[in-house]
């Protein structure tokens, strides 16, 4: 029997249960009795809810039209609970995005939005040069340009008072201002809290603990209701500006603690090495410690940002109408009473999209900045 | 707290001599707009429409004042206010007047440094029942289960009313008005109680609004009206008489449609109203055609009512107490002479 006669048996296919979708199902859905149980319960819940949700949100929904009649049956009864009235959203869409911003001037926020998207994309793309300058511009130059464009008042731009700002635009402005202003203040506070100088340290600790100890809603309420009573009569202080100040004061305290976490994560050797090189305090921090510390805390910063983004809905209690509440107010128009559900669903979807985008953006940013000593 | 406030107030008045309150009229003329505090959204009273224009019965009071003072009803800067901050906004001068479904009570009138300039809507707590119950009066509601929004004076009024009439009831409380109406619809209760103006808005949210009706009984007094700061009588008079002008125009049958013909009227009352004779406007420190502008641009009270909350609106609220005194209601304006 020579070797040439040896005919290996043809390969058997892998066992049925170890390949294709069957394996995927076994691994992911039915890997243990408990997981099997969970899968069955989930499928049952989906079976109960999904047909109704799809029917309400898509198949039975009213999509076209401009009046309430589009969402009513032939005999004039509203179709609450049968089909969603997306006409309510489409009629109000402009208001949801821009608030009461004059339609003929809406190109200005549009320019700002395009600029922001451009900057954020540039920061993420490979091969773009001068990234630190683009980054600095995004944090410093861009807010100024955005402020000039949206508010107007110089360069012949017509002034649009802040009481006409609203909707998604206001939500984004509030959160952007909150984050951009609180990041540097928070960093300084974090450094102050770890400082050797007793007065600086005490002041930072008192500030941080005070502002972390009060709820944001109280801060906003104080800014709007109490502050005007203390100001001289007739002094006007823009309501939005009061909210900005409140949010920034509040947010910096949180930011300080996030940054402090990063500072503490830097090994002592880094500090000592910087000292050994004879660097001054600010050089040590600016060149060695902070670049490493801030990179570590990107998830924390984004986390704070997402929380702030959702917290901006609280400004409603001082009468600023951001995205969630412009939908609520829209449902108080007597022509459109009773379509609040559609408004809330739409707001939830919008918030989810933005938060999801932010979290992914930050993950990408972390990958870009990853320089080899990832913990 | 009060002491600190006083101290601060004194400090400020000493250091800075601001006298903005004395001349709200001058401020308004200087700014070219009336800063009017409105509700952040109340069907039929104040809410922005799809194009962002504020509409409603409360909004029309702001528009009437703007028409009287500036000759243009559109020159209003609306400041949406929540219930908690409305009085502060007025006290601090952030707004010139407040027209935000605010109930006129003695406490508010006497202790807040504010003046109520009249009543643009007589509201009161009422009942919404399912028609199939066959109830025609609130007095037939003995033993009923009642849906209420928790933590409001509505609850107290309800208890008072049923006790006074020796009836039993079972309260089912909800947190928001949306939940209340859902509970009513699901049959958790026989009756829903709230302010009457709200009941009509809640009724629209039912799957079949025709299946429920509002009972005629009103169990509390809720006169709603515009508010101004104390100590500026010129402005107080202007707001007060802008409202009266709306009512007088309806009494005299002057509408936004026929007003130009009415200018030729020989009725001295109409002549005084429209400024073709007399010095009413000058006495109020306004132009002679102040009331003409109000009626021309806003309409008379009846028109504003029908347009915003009455039969030509989705709310379909009956005039009831808000009918003119000559037609069985209590809307009454002192004579303009």
Image (spheres, coloured by chain):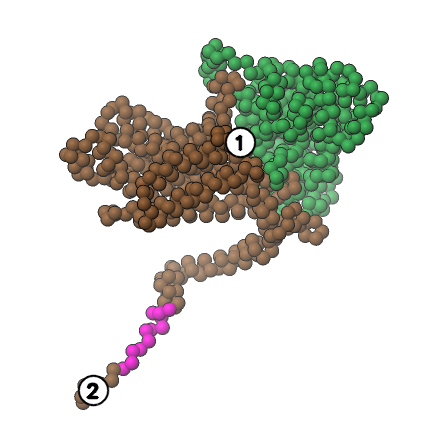
Chain colours: A brown, B green
Magenta segment: does it hold A357? no
Q: Mark 1 or mark 2: which comes first in sequence?
A: 2
Q: Give the SS element for disc 2.
A: helix
Q: Does residue B308 appear left or right of residue B112 in this picture?
A: right
Q: Quadrant of residue B133?
A: top right
Protein chain holding label 1 = A
Residue at x 78%, y 28% (from the top left corner): B259
Distance (Cα) linking label 1 and label 2:
92 Å
Query: Is residue A328 or residue A39 the one in the foreground?
Result: A328
Magenta residues (range): A9-20
Magenta segment: does it hold A11? yes
Task: Say if A188 sits above or below A364 in the image.
Answer: above
User: Which residue appears farthest toward the right when viewing the image?
Assistant: B266
Task: Say if A345 sits above or below A212 in the image.
Answer: below
Q: Nearer the viewer, mark 1 or mark 2?
A: 1
User: Which residue appears farthest toward the top when viewing the image?
Assistant: B14
Can you identify the residue that label 2 sits on? A4
Q: Quadrant of residue B140?
A: top right
Can you identify the residue that label 1 sits on? A158
Protein chain holding label 2 = A
Q: Main secondary structure of the magenta part?
A: loop
Q: Are marks 1 and 2 on the same chain?
A: yes
Task: Say if B310 sits above or below B110 in the image.
Answer: below
- How packed mark 2 is, by other alpha carbons closer than 10 Å (few <14, some 14-19, many 20 or more), is few
Q: Does residue A188 appear left or right of residue B45 in this picture?
A: left
């Amino acid at each position: 029997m020579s070797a040439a006669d040896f005919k290996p048996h043809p390969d058997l296919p892998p066992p049925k249960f170890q390949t294709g979708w069957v394996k995927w199902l076994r691994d992911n859905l039915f890997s243990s009795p408990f997981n099997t149980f969970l899968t069955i319960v989930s499928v049952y819940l989906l079976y109960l809810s999904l047909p109704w949700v799809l029917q309400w949100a898509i198949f039975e929904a009213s999509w076209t039209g401009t009046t309430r009649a589009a969402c009513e049956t032939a005999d004039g009864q509203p179709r609450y609970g049968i089909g969603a009235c997306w006409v309510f959203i489409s009629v109000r869409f402009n208001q949801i995005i821009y608030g009461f911003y004059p339609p003929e001037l809406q190109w200005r926020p549009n320019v700002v939005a395009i600029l922001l998207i451009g900057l954020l994309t540039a920061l993420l793309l490979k091969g773009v040069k001068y990234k630190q300058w683009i980054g600095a511009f995004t944090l410093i130059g861009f807010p100024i340009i955005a402020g000039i464009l949206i508010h107007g008042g110089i360069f012949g731009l017509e002034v649009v008072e802040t009481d006409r700002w609203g909707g998604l635009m206001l939500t984004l402005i509030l959160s952007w201002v909150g984050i951009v202003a609180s990041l540097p203040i928070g960093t300084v506070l974090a450094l102050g809290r770890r400082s050797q100088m007793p007065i600086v340290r005490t002041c930072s600790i008192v500030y941080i603990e005070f502002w972390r100890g009060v709820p944001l809603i109280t801060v906003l309420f104080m800014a709007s209701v109490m502050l005007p009573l203390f100001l001289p009569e007739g002094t006007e202080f823009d309501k939005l500006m009061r909210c900005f100040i409140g949010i920034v004061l509040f947010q910096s305290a949180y930011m300080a603690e996030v940054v402090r976490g990063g500072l503490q994560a830097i090994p002592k050797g880094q500090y000592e090495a910087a000292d050994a090189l004879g660097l001054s305090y600010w050089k040590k921090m600016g060149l060695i410690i902070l670049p490493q510390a801030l990179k570590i805390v990107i998830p924390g910063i984004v986390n704070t940002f997402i929380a702030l983004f959702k917290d901006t809905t609280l400004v409603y209690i001082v009468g600023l109408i951001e995205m969630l509440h412009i939908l609520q107010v829209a449902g108080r128009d007597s022509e459109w009473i009773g379509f609040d559900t559609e408004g809330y669903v739409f707001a939830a979807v919008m918030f989810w999209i933005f938060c999801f985008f932010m979290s992914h953006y930050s993950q990408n940013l972390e990958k870009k900045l990853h320089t080899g000593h990832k913990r | 707290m009060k002491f600190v406030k006083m101290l601060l107030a004194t400090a400020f008045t000493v250091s800075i001599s601001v006298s903005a309150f004395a001349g709200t009229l001058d401020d308004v003329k200087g700014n070219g707009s009336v800063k009017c505090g409105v509700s952040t959204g109340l069907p039929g009273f104040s809410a922005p429409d799809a194009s962002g224009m504020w509409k409603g019965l409360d909004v029309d009071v702001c528009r009437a004042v703007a028409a009287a003072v500036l000759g243009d009803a559109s020159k209003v800067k609306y400041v949406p206010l929540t219930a908690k901050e409305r009085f502060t906004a007025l006290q601090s001068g952030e707004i010139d007047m407040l027209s935000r479904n605010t109930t006129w009570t003695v406490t508010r009138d006497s202790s807040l440094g504010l003046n109520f300039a009249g009543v643009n809507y007589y509201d009161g707590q009422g009942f919404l029942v399912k028609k199939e119950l066959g109830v025609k009066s609130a007095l037939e509601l003995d033993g009923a289960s009642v849906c209420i929004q928790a933590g409001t004076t509505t609850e107290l009024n309800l208890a008072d009313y049923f006790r006074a009439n020796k009836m039993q009831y079972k309260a089912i409380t909800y947190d928001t008005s949306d939940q209340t109406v859902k509970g009513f619809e699901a049959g958790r209760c026989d009756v829903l109680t709230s302010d009457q103006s709200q009941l009509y808005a809640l009724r629209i949210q039912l799957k079949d609004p025709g299946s429920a009706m509002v009972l005629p009984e009103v169990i509390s007094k809720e006169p709603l009206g515009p508010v101004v700061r104390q100590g500026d009588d010129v402005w107080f008079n202007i707001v007060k008489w802008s409202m009266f002008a709306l009512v007088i125009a309806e009494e005299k049958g002057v509408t936004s449609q026929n007003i130009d013909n009415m200018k030729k009227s020989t009725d001295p009352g109409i002549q005084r109203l429209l400024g073709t004779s007399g010095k009413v406007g000058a006495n109020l420190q306004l132009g002679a055609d102040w009331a003409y502008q109000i009626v021309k641009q806003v309409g008379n009270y009846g028109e504003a009512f029908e347009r915003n909350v009455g039969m030509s609106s989705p709310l379909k609220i009956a005039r009831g107490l808000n009918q003119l005194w000559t037609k069985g209601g209590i809307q009454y304006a002192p004579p303009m002479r």
